[in-house]
Image (spheres, helix red, strand yellow):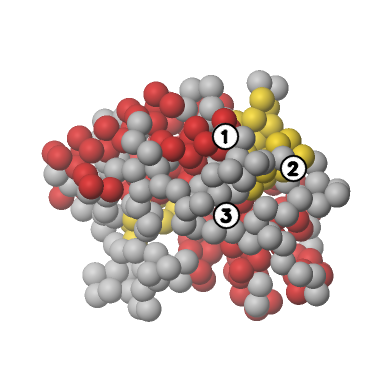
Amino acid sequence: MSHVLDAPPPEAAPDWTVPQRWERFTAGEHARWRALFDRQMRLLPGRAAPEFLDGVAKLDLADGVPDFRRLSERLMKLTGWQVVAVPGLVPEAVFFAHLAERRFVAGNFLRDAGHMDYLEEPDVFHDVFGHVPMLAHPVFADYMQAYGQGGLRSIGFGSLDKLARLYWYTVEFGLVETAEGLRIYGAGIVSSAGESRFALESPSPNRLGFSLERVMRTRYRIDAFQQTYFVIPSFEALLRQTLETDFAPLYARLAALPDLGITDILPEDRVFTRGTQAEAAPLRDAAA
């Protein structure tokens, strides 16, 4: 993570949460949310996983920046999750603790009009539109809680970088195999106009079958569209692998293995697409 605060600011609770103060969002910010929402919803049918689109429909996210209290009420009825506001990127232990208690931490600001297409630090649109619809799906909601619980245990193993890769290649930039073809579900893709197209349609990136150990060995970069995406066979399979894995020996094994490059393809990989890497230079979202 970057720009992580060293300590909670004075207005924050001990768990780093702050009041959302939804009433402070302006009419212009609500209009900006609607513009972002409408742009993505023109792109995502036929590209996004059905589970994501179902979550969007159930949570009623179209009208403006969501009020976290009302959003949490709907989400709680579906899967027992809540959305809580935080002042910025929080330390890993705080993040994991919230996930383990079925609370998703979300930024409390919306990007300005000059950054509609790319923002380095996650804002409320990325956090809520990108992440929260999948939390309405019971299996993925359980995966996120299991990730938080595993994160708390991982702190003592010195393997946070490996666990971050699992989050990156599933929660942020994951693809899922469906009967209709590959679909996107990662928040970093579904909240991005450019990467919503690129992840499925560009010949540039590799698209490889998911393996827990493989993913946790693979480096990533944050300044470009992905050069490799990993494809899970189903959300049930992702949860099952996570719950059935004893991470202590896995971390020990990973410590003895070299990291893998972003574009590496191994002989044992299931290859959906062997990318050309023609667009591997740093990219930013193109306007829709």
Q: What is the three-letter code of the residue carrying label 3?
A: Trp
Q: Nearer the viewer, residue 67 or 210?
A: 210
**Of marks 1 and 3, which one's residue comes earlier in the chain?**
3
Could you say whether the residue bearing mark 2 is in a helix, strand or loop? strand
Q: What is the three-letter code of the residue carrying label 1?
A: Ser
User: Is disc 2 surrounded by few (<14), some (14 to 19) or many (20+) residues within 10 Å?
Assistant: many
- Please tell me whether residue 47 is drawn above or below residue 143 in the rendered image: above
Q: Nearer the viewer, residue 211 or 279?
A: 279
Q: Quadrant of residue 216 in the image?
A: bottom right
**Of marks 2 and 3, which one's residue comes earlier in the chain?**
3
Q: Mark on residue 228?
A: none
**Percent x, y of residue 202:** 57, 34
Q: Quadrant of residue 73 in the image?
A: top left
Residue 137 seen in this snapshot: no
**Is the C-beta separation of discs 1 and 3 under 8 Å?**
no
Which residue in the protein does label 1 denote? 202
Which residue in the protein does label 2 denote? 209
Q: Residue furthest right?
A: 268
- Please tell me whether residue 36 is drawn above or below residue 158 in the rendered image: above
- Distance CA(mark 1)–CA(mark 3): 20 Å
- Distance CA(mark 2)–CA(mark 3): 15 Å
**Mark 1 or 2, closer to the camera:** 1
